[in-house]
Image (tube, grey):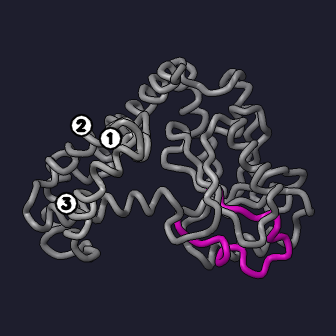
Amino acid sequence: MLFASGGFKVKLYDIGQQQVTNALEKIRKEMKFLEQSGSLKGSLGAEEQLSLISGCLNIQEAVEGAMHIQECVPENLELKKKIFAQLDQIVDDKVVLSSSTSCLLPSKVFAGLAHVKQCIVAHPVNPPYYVPLVELVPHPKTAPATVDRTYALMQKIGQSPVRVMKEIDGFALNRLQYAVISEAWRLVEEGIVSPSDLDLVVSDGLGMRYAFIGPLETMHLNAEGMLSYCDRYSEGMQHVLKTFGPIPDFSGATVEKVNQAMCVKVPNDPEHLAARRQWRDECLLRLAKLKRQMQPQ
């Protein structure tokens, strides 16, 4: 949907016909809804964008003439390697080979490929139509031009690409996310705060700021600049950081406690989860509009 919003012709490939059929039906429904609500991205109408998207079951046909290939198969290293090995046999020396992996290292996903210079991880954030960040993570042998081209393409379709200079487990987003989840879990596990109050600390506290400015700018603004902040608060931060506990195992009594609290708020049957995700997406849609209106002068 995002590539079509930028005016690009898109081919969806899968080994299962039903997957392709379902995807095309879902895209049509979603685009019509977005157009009716005035939230469709790009300068083209829904029908024009839909006409750019087609599906096929032949990988060679799918990649013929492509400038960019975005792999989105499940987070399974062997499956991803198998797909890229297939692509390696049939692509030219120009197309960018990109993986959507959220945590598998490029050096493992693209190991042994002849076209490794054209390979890059472009990790989108779920749901990508409403959350624009894309992490670009190169293989050690990725050509700088591959990174530059992918960066420009992501900008053209309205995303916010960031360059992760070298590969690291979890990239940037998940390292930050897991640090927050880890401490959140410890606070609940140690009886410091309830699961529902913990979520409020983020949704009605940190998240309010972080929706517009990151943690580093937050520091900068919470004192007379960054140097002032570090001078004033570094000792206190180090004291607190030294009290952080071990990595949780995310099991046992705590997972039961957290699950129970979450199910009170959102029962974990498909219907309730789908409704809550839809509400989340509508919130993100409105937030995205607000962020565009609130661009700093």
| Label located before the other in sequence (1 or 3) | 1
Q: Residues within 10 Å of mark 2 (few under 14, many from 20)?
A: few
Residue 79 as seen in the image, left or right of residue 284: right
Q: CA distance from mark 2 to mark 3?
A: 21 Å
At x 80%, y 59%, the residue is: 144
- Residue under numbered circle 2: 204
Question: Viewer-nearest of labels 2 and 3?
Answer: 2
| Label located before the other in sequence (2 or 3) | 2
Q: CA distance from mark 1 to mark 2?
A: 6 Å
Q: Amino acid at mark 1?
A: Gly
Residue span colored magenta = 103-122
Expressed as whole percent of the image width and height from the top left, the position of residue 255 reads: 19, 67
Expressed as whole percent of the image width and height from the top left, the position of residue 290 reads: 45, 23
At x 19%, y 69%, the residue is: 243
Q: Are marks 1 and 2 in contact (CB under 8 Å)?
A: yes
Expressed as whole percent of the image width and height from the top left, the position of residue 172 reads: 51, 59
Number of dots carrying numbers: 3
Q: Is residue 147 above or below residue 158?
A: below
- Residue under numbered circle 3: 259
